[in-house]
Amino acid sequence: MFKDYESTKKHLAELATIVNSFKSEAVQLRIVELLFKDIAQNKEDGEQLDTGSKKPLEKKTTKKKKSNSSSDNGAKKSNRGRPGPAVILNRLYTEGFFKKKRMIGDIIAHCSSKLAFQYKTPELSGTLARFVRDGKLDRDKNAEDQYEYVQK
């Protein structure tokens, strides 16, 4: 694996104390990555570093996927999976779902049972607040101290 195993082990022990002196794990990780990148480049110039793996490592390339944009307010929906909160709330708004007062629990239950999309309260609450600020919806607290949303 390594030609001079004991020397490498000694160097790594010395490096460990230096790397661990940084409080941030992200900084520690970045330092180790830079060190091993430098070692790998030096080995490419001279001798190959045998890591024991049979296949050479390949770089992963990431491709950005295009997403469809909603014509209503520029909200985006991916090609796969469920629509985002803005898309689904716009859909409910245009279908007249908010003509009656609805609590966030009612919205989540409707999405789950009728539309087969699962959402959690924090996912929808921000978008609902934006709809209130934009004047699409109005909200009032009920006797249970929960907001009820209704179309203006």
Image (cartoon, grey):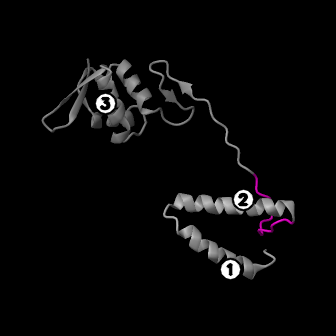
Q: At x 52% / y 69%, what residue is drawn?
A: 21
Query: Dot 2, crowdedness within 10 Å: few (<14), some or many (≥20)?
Result: few
Which of marks 1 and 3 precedes in the sequence? 1
68 vs 97, left or right, is right
14 vs 52, left or right, is left
Q: Amino acid at mark 1?
A: Lys
Q: Amino acid at mark 2?
A: Lys
Task: State which region is magenta.
Answer: 47-58
Element at label 1? helix
Q: At x 83% / y 60%, what residue is drawn?
A: 44
Which of marks 2 and 1 precedes in the sequence? 1
Q: Nearer the viewer, residue 126 or 48?
A: 48
Question: Is residue 137 one of those drawn in magenta?
Answer: no
Tell me whether the residue at label 1 lies in contact with that at label 2, contact meaning CB atoms closer than 8 angstroms.
no
Element at label 3? helix
Q: Which residue is mark 3?
A: 129
What separation in Å lies between label 2 and label 3 (alpha carbons)? 47 Å
Q: Which residue is mark 1?
A: 10
Question: Is residue 48 one of those drawn in magenta?
Answer: yes
x and y percent of residue 149 in the render?
25, 27
| Residue 109 visible somewhere in the drawing | yes
Q: At x 80% / y 68%, what residue is drawn?
A: 50
Q: Which residue is mark 2?
A: 37
Mark nearer the viewer, 2 or 3: 2
Q: Amino acid at mark 3?
A: Ala
x and y percent of residue 113 in the render?
37, 36
